[in-house]
Image: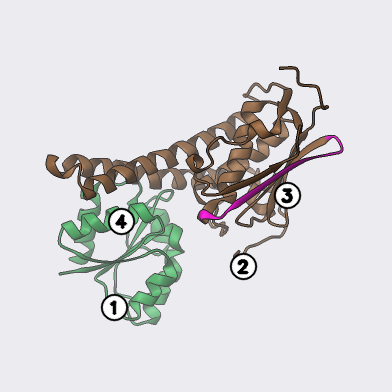
């Protein structure tokens, strides 16, 4: 972890001022345009390769580069757009008892997490929107797993909440705020996902915080036996 | 053969820029960070520096070039969120706004090197 990172608290409302909002959108534009440029260039270069070389090592490299870049653009756009919709309460939120174990991705590698060790309390239920809760947890896993770091997820009931702790590459509380140009905490391709996850946690009646470098998502718990399906 | 120092934080985009420049006949020394770029200019005299603003502030890089007696080396800023004026304020003599076309890159590089 970079010891130069600024870990001092910064109230969210300061980041939400119009001037900082403009800076955040500038950051978003920069983040999206880089992989967009990579996608455009790699596709163009691929199309210029002689037909016989497209299936060779050079063509393979360009094709993989293009797919990687498009996937990154997609993640950035989807995270940003969901955050925007949540800001204007534009996302319907359902509530139902859901097994927390079912909120974890079926294939962690597919979302860019090279190693995931999960320890979920047996029978733990959250009272939440399963689709949105999955998006929040996935966002945390992606950022925690940056740099090919192993991710540990632990979930248990604490009083009336289902507490999900995600530990990997350490983060600071500032990582949860909307990103601004010059922020020096490297969050990788999931850099817009934490702002989205913070909004999702609030929309789901829960909270998202950072404790000891780990993400802590707390969602309302459902009573054991509440799930009938 | 002209030497271009490329300071680009994005690994894939940096690879592509390097490939395009090399295919056009330039030598390219590529690093990922501004610190790496500064280390290079102490040993090399590139004809041009292409600097991704995400890799560090251009003004600081330009001042470092001057301090090494290489202030005449043209600096082109690569940015996804600043226009030419913002790049000029950041210390660049040239600007490439991401995503840019291949011909824009080649024209900018040729133009700056021939100055």
Residue at (53%, 45%) from the top-left corner? A190
A18 to A184, vertically: above or below: above
Look at the image and tell me whether residue A91 can be seen: yes
Residue placed under numbered mark 4 in the picture:
B15
Secondary structure under tag 1 reads loop
Look at the image and tell me whether residue A196 can be seen: no
Question: Which chain is represented by brown in the image?
Answer: A
State the extent of the magenta-drawn residues as a range: A148-160
Residue A72 image point, x, y percent: 44, 42
Question: Which chain is represented by green in the image?
Answer: B
**Alpha carbons under labels 2 and 1: distance apart:** 30 Å
What subunit carries mark 2? Answer: A
For residue B107: magenta?
no
**Alpha carbons under labels 4 and 2: distance apart:** 29 Å
Q: Compare marks 4 and 1 and give the one earlier in the sequence.
A: 4
B35 to A97, vertically: above or below: below
**Alpha carbons under labels 3 and 4: distance apart:** 39 Å
Residue at (65%, 43%) from the top-left corner? A16
For residue A3, side relative to residue B89 (left or right) = right
Q: Residues within 10 Å of mark 4 (few under 14, many from 20)?
A: some
B4 or A97: which is nearer to us?
Answer: A97
Residue placed under numbered mark 1 in the picture:
B44
A67 or B36: which is nearer to us?
Answer: A67
Is the residue at mark 4 from the same chain as the one at mark 1?
yes
Residue A61 image point, x, y percent: 28, 48
Q: Are marks 1 and 3 in contact (CB under 8 Å)?
A: no
Q: Residues within 10 Å of mark 3 (few under 14, many from 20)?
A: few
A14 to B2, vertically: above or below: above
Residue placed under numbered mark 2 in the picture:
A4
Is the residue at mark 1 from the same chain as the one at mark 3?
no
Residue at (15%, 62%) from the top-left corner? B25
Secondary structure under tag 4 reads helix
């Amino acid at each position: 972890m970079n010891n130069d990172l600024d870990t001092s608290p910064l109230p969210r409302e300061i980041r939400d001022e119009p001037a900082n909002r403009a800076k955040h959108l500038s950051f978003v534009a920069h983040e999206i345009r880089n992989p967009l440029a990579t996608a455009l260039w790699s596709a163009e270069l691929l199309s210029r390769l002689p037909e016989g070389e497209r299936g060779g090592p050079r063509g393979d490299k360009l094709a993989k580069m293009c797919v990687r870049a498009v996937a990154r653009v997609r993640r950035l756009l989807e995270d940003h757009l969901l955050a925007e919709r949540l800001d204007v309460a534009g996302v319907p939120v359902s509530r139902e008892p859901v097994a927390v174990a079912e909120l974890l991705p079926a294939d962690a590698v597919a979302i860019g997490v090279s190693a995931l060790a999960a320890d979920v309390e047996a029978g733990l239920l959250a009272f939440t929107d399963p689709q949105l809760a999955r998006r929040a947890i996935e966002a945390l896993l992606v950022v925690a797993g940056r740099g090919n770091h192993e991710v540990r997820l632990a979930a248990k009931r604490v009083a009336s909440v289902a507490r999900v702790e995600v530990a990997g590459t350490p983060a600071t509380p500032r990582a949860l705020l909307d990103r601004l140009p010059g922020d020096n905490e490297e969050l990788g391709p999931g850099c817009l996902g934490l702002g989205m996850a913070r909004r999702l946690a609030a929309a789901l009646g829960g909270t998202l915080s950072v404790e000891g470098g780990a993400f802590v998502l707390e969602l309302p718990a459902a009573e054991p036996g509440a799930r009938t399906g | 053969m002209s030497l271009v120092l490329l300071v680009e934080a994005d690994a894939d985009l940096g690879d592509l820029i390097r490939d395009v420049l090399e295919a056009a006949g330039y030598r390219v020394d590529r690093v990922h960070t501004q610190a790496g770029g500064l280390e290079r200019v102490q040993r090399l005299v590139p004809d041009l520096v292409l600097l991704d603003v995400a890799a560090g502030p251009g003004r600081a890089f330009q001042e470092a070039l001057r301090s090494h007696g290489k202030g005449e080396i043209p600096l082109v800023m690569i940015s996804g969120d600043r226009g030419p004026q913002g790049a000029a304020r950041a210390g660049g003599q040239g600007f490439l706004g991401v995503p840019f076309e291949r011909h824009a890159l080649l024209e900018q590089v040729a133009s700056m090197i021939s100055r």
